[in-house]
Image (spheres, rainbow, N blue to C red):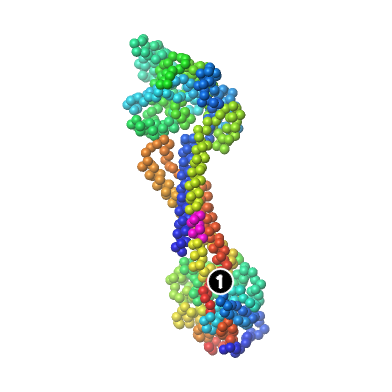
Amino acid sequence: MRTFWVAALGIAAGVATLTFFLALASGMRAVVFGKILPLDQVEVIPPESSVGSVFSMLGARPPGIDEAQAQALRRADGVRLALPRLRLAFPTSGRGGRAMFGRDVGAGEIPADGVDPSMVRADLRAGTAFDDPSARASHRACATDADCGVASGEYCDLVALPQSGQPRPAGECSPPIPAVVSPYLVEVFNGAIAPAHGLPRLGEMLLRQAEGLILEWDLGRAGLGAARQGTPRRVHAKLVGVSPRAMDLGVTIPMSVARRLNREYAGEDAATRYSSVVVYLRDPSWMTEVAARVRAEGLEVRTRGAEQMGLLATAVTVILSLASVVTVLVAALNIAHGFAAMISERQGELGLLRALGATRRDVRWLLVLEAAAIGAGAASLGVGLARLGGWACDLVARTRLPDFPFKPDTWFVFGWRSVLGVLLFGVAACVLAALRPAWRAAKIDPAAALSGGVG
Amino acid sequence: MSEPTVLTPDPTAGAVPEIALRDVRKRYPGGRAALDGVSLAIAPGELVAVTGRSGSGKSTLLHVAGALDRDFEGEVRVLGRSLSTLSDAEAAALRHASIGYVFQAFHLVAAWTVRQNVALPASFAPAPVPDLAARVDRWLERVGLAGRGDDLPTALSGGQRQRVAIARALLMEPRILLCDEPTGSLDAETGASILGLFQSLHEERSMTVLLVTHEARATAIATRVLTLADGKLVDDVVQSRGAA
């Protein structure tokens, strides 16, 4: 019997590892495809956008997506929403954060894009303005921010950057440009930038404080060069919230502002042709069909490696699961051995059952059902062990691992379908292992089994 | 003892035999004869003791007569049905409905209560047994174990365990009771009480009882005594109770 129970524990161990790895894979997929690379959305970009600068240098019309193409995408089957983005097509740099960090944090290049306000409005506090501030500006003449008054919330928007030794350029009072950032950027900041520069992480509380943070942007001038047209100047942007629909690594502003600034610094084409359209699918199963429709429109899909990540995750899951399956199968072989030994020990009992009226079929079923019950018990124990292991790993990760971008609260997702599947697999392995011994047990000679000798 | 002293007596002349063997032969794997041309007929209501030395074929005769062992030559008819023609399921149904077994080793399931052990044969009934719990309690009371239904077999003495086995054998109220050395594991006093129980059950239910034993006191309660030697039926005596 010892062999038998050891084998049952083997089933439990196999089921535990299988459940554990499946839950880990599900957890990782939830993070990767739920937060980092969402599978229910796809970014549509113009063809060969990577050589856009070459087009520009040759004086050709740079790649972009026009409104007609955006409309076609909105009408495509499987598309829930198609929201254009307009990338700022000129150099911009910026700094800010003194109020929060005690010093300014700067960036030599600030990627930014404009989106329709409806895209992010749901992620902002009620009443937060996310539109072109020029419509609300007092337009009072000014030379410094103080001329506009702190209480007004406006700053002095100068027509050019002030030069030392030169008269201060003219300006007029205007509210800052509203801007939102993505949780992805916050994670990158918390996981990589903040530790490297000794800055505090942006937790929930600091994020609330960060809303209202003023950033100074130099338009038309950045570390890598200046805009081809327009006069470089400094504007204020105000962080008004965090939205998952904001640009991943950059800042998102209202579409009308991006359009106006692109017109000013990069020309009419840059103001009217979208840099990309984010297409939200009804569900991930539409991916292939929508991608085909996108290509039919002469556009491309930026996959961001989601498919490759998916394949990699699947491959790792399969390898780990196979190892677990092998464990279960080895345990099943032990179960078969244990069952054979157990049946040998229970000859008298089985003979009695036959004497009391059990048919061979009854004996077979009895043993198979016993195996199923043992398999269910062992598999349940295995699932319990897996959950315990997952909980322990989460605890260690929470308390011992340093923070990094997208560090999840839990690494495991125990979906009921996979748990049920693994339970059934454990039961099936036990039943299969018991089939041959059960068939043999049904054939035992009840007379010999009962007497154990001759009279 | 090479020749039987009395051949196939028929105390209930005219009745169809409950168990009938005709020229039954069976060999052990080594080739030695377990049963060697045994013919006999047991009429309804007989209490037959089967005696003989160890290895004489007593238990084999019991197994063959009880449809537990159907690998033999010759013909065995139980309740008028030839065992050779029965399928496994039919033989199982015959055992379940018409034959009760009591063994020397009791064969109780140690992890089950007395009541569960007694109720075990009902598991193989083709339909639910009506009033099963009441029936179990009735039989426990009849064998002197009223109130012990919730005990485990390990809490009982050897004699009490054999009484549980008897109650289990009689649960389905069979017409034939086959007993293989039922007192072999019991002390003299307990064995006597068990034999007394068999005798009273036989009298009140008029069932056919085949009792394999090598004890003289067991043959004393029989109405007929068969003696086997080397697989042959060498003696067949009809007697009045207490004659042995």
Q: Residue furthest top?
A: A167
Q: Tell me: residue B161, above or below residue A244.
A: below
Residue B212 painted magenta = no
Residue A396 pos. (x, y %): 38, 44
The amino acid beneath tag 1 is Pro
Residue depicted at x 51% and y 58%: A333
Of A439 and B67, the residue lying toward us: A439
Left/right of residue A209 with respect to residue B152 in the rendered view? left
Q: Is residue A54 visible?
A: yes
Q: Which residues are magenta?
A: A328-336
Q: In the rendered image, which residue does mark 1 sit on?
A: A446
Left/right of residue B43 with respect to residue A311 in the rendered view? right
Q: Tell me: residue B119, above or below residue B50.
A: above
Q: Tell me: residue B94, above or below residue B232.
A: above
Q: Residues within 10 Å of mark 1 (few under 14, many from 20)?
A: many
| Total marks in image | 1
Among the 4 quarters of the image, the one containing residue B129: bottom right
Of A83 and A194, the residue lying toward us: A194
Residue A332 painted magenta = yes
Residue B82 pos. (x, y %): 65, 75
- Give the SS element for disc 1: helix
The majority secondary structure of the magenta stretch comes to helix
Residue depicted at x 43% and y 39%: A408
Q: Is residue A176 visible?
A: no
Residue A251 pos. (x, y %): 44, 26
